[in-house]
């Protein structure tokens, strides 16, 4: 296969590191709607068309020669179209942010935003594709049919448990990187933040008791990542309590996790699970009562990641935890997927990888954690979401892990 045309990591577009004076001002609804008017994306050309010669080369008759060349040698599509470097940002609108099932059209502003982040942080082009169907077969068939148009798939805001089957089937059907960011992007950043937090409180991953509130896409992926990092005691809660093998109401995914987590077979809710726990990770809309947080171990770690309302207010959590993180930008320690997904996809595409593997995701975890390591503090366990070093570092680590494989 011919090599893909690719930008070097150093060419990634990055945001400024110093916020403008207006960044601390309250954001108004008028400002938000004005910023989204007309959408947030546009297509630009890589070679301007100013003359008739330019036109003849870019379009007819010149373009026909390139099309004939690809027909004779399909590998030329890798180097003479943008498809192999284009990410499809795909959603069915069933689990959008904290808004739930709001439909395809209402999800489009979020997917446009995702594309804007791909371009800003990783220099990657992407196209939002929102599908007016929740049928897994139809989604898979649609993406398989249009696969020649892109080189990677970022699944976004697809509800659980459908998201697990959808991602699995797309990985099997498409010869390109596929990742559901709500699962794996979240898991990567949570794991990186946990590495930083444990260093701050001087605890080891291999001694932790971790409680995860939420057994949806993010909760399942976070649990899998922590197991891969050899965290020995992970307890997961859904709306009916802890997952354990004695429960007869568990789905296939939850039952599988119940067999590999909760080694002490704790039954009950957050009160029982959090007694003596070192870490709470909230990835659901449920609340964490202060009384339950009070019974955690000394130097506890609380990641209350539900947006826009954390499971417990940060000022309340800090009464009982040494390190507190949220998913919000207006509190310290923002655990944000933008630290992970741009670099992961950039690294996978730079490596010409056909899959995003566990070693690649673990490489991303350590790359993010290492950037925060020199100046760790209770209020700084991960780099800023606007840190321009993150995407290049993650991309380089992911690319190296892919090439080793």
Image (tube, helix red, strand yellow):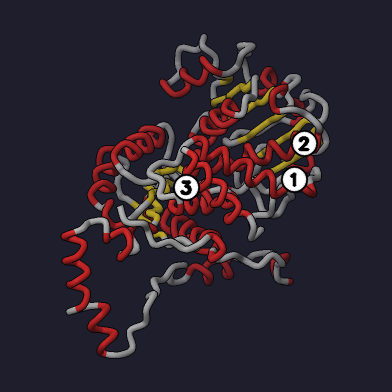
Element at label 2: helix
Q: Are marks 3 and 2 in contact (CB under 8 Å)?
A: no
Q: Nearer the viewer, residue 244 or 373?
A: 373
* 28 lies above or below 172: below
Q: Are marks 2 and 1 in contact (CB under 8 Å)?
A: yes
Label 2 CA crowd tier, 10 Å (few <14, some 14–19, many 20+)? some
* Left or right of 399 on screen, residue 51: left
Q: Residue at x 58, y 56 (%)?
A: 392
x and y percent of residue 271 in the render?
A: 69, 21
Closer to the eye: label 3 or 1: 1
x and y percent of residue 103 in the render?
A: 38, 49
Residue picked out by circle 1: 373
- Among the 4 quarters of the image, the one containing residue 108: bottom left
Residue picked out by circle 2: 199
Residue picked out by circle 3: 96
Residue 318's disc is none
Label 3 vs label 2: CA separation?
33 Å
x and y percent of residue 33 in the render?
A: 52, 67
Q: Residue at x 38, y 50 (%)?
A: 152
Label 3 vs label 1: CA separation?
33 Å
- Among the 4 quarters of the image, the one containing residue 127: bottom left
Extreme-top residue of the structure? 246
* 377 lies above or below 38: above
Q: Taking the image as drawn, is residue 25 in sight?
A: no
Q: Earlier in the sequence, mark 3 or mark 1?
A: 3
Element at label 3: loop
* Left or right of 283 on screen, residue 207: right
Q: Residue at x 21, y 62 (%)?
A: 70
């Amino acid at each position: 296969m011919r090599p893909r045309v690719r930008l070097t990591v150093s060419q990634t577009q990055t945001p400024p590191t110093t916020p403008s004076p207006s960044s601390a001002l309250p954001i108004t609804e008028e400002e938000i709607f004005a910023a989204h008017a007309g959408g947030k994306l546009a297509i630009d050309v890589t070679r301007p068309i100013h003359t008739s010669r330019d036109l003849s080369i870019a379009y007819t008759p010149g373009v026909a020669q390139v099309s004939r060349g690809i027909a004779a040698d399909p590998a030329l599509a890798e180097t003479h179209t943008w498809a192999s470097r284009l990410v499809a940002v795909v959603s069915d609108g069933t689990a959008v942010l904290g808004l739930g099932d709001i439909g395809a059209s209402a999800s489009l502003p979020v997917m446009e935003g995702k594309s804007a982040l791909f371009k800003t942080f990783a220099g990657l082009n992407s196209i939002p594709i929102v599908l007016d169907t929740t049928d897994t077969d139809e989604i898979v068939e649609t993406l398989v049919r249009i696969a020649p148009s892109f080189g990677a798939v970022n699944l976004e805001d697809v509800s659980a448990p459908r998201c697990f089957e959808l991602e699995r089937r797309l990985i099997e059907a498409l010869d390109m990187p596929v990742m559901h960011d709500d699962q794996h992007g979240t898991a990567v950043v949570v794991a990186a933040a946990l590495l930083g937090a444990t260093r701050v409180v001087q605890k080891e991953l291999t001694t932790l008791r971790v409680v995860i509130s939420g057994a949806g896409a993010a909760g399942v992926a976070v649990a899998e990542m922590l197991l891969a990092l050899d965290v020995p005691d992970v307890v997961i809660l859904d709306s009916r309590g802890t997952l354990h093998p004695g429960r007869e109401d568990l789905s296939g995914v939850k039952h599988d996790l119940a067999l590999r987590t909760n080694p002490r077979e704790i039954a009950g809710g957050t009160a029982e699970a959090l007694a003596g726990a070192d870490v709470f990770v909230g990835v659901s809309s449920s609340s964490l009562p202060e009384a339950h947080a009070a019974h955690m171990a000394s130097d506890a770690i609380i990641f209350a990641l539900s947006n826009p309302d954390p499971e417990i207010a940060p000022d309340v959590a800090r009464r009982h935890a040494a390190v507190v993180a949220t998913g919000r930008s207006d509190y310290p320690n923002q655990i944000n997927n933008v630290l992970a997904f741009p670099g992961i996809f950039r690294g996978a595409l730079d490596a010409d990888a056909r899959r995003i593997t566990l070693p690649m995701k673990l490489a991303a975890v350590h790359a993010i954690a290492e950037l925060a390591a020199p100046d760790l503090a209770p209020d700084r366990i991960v780099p800023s979401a606007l840190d321009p070093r993150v995407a290049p570092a993650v991309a380089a680590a992911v690319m190296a892990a892919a090439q080793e494989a």
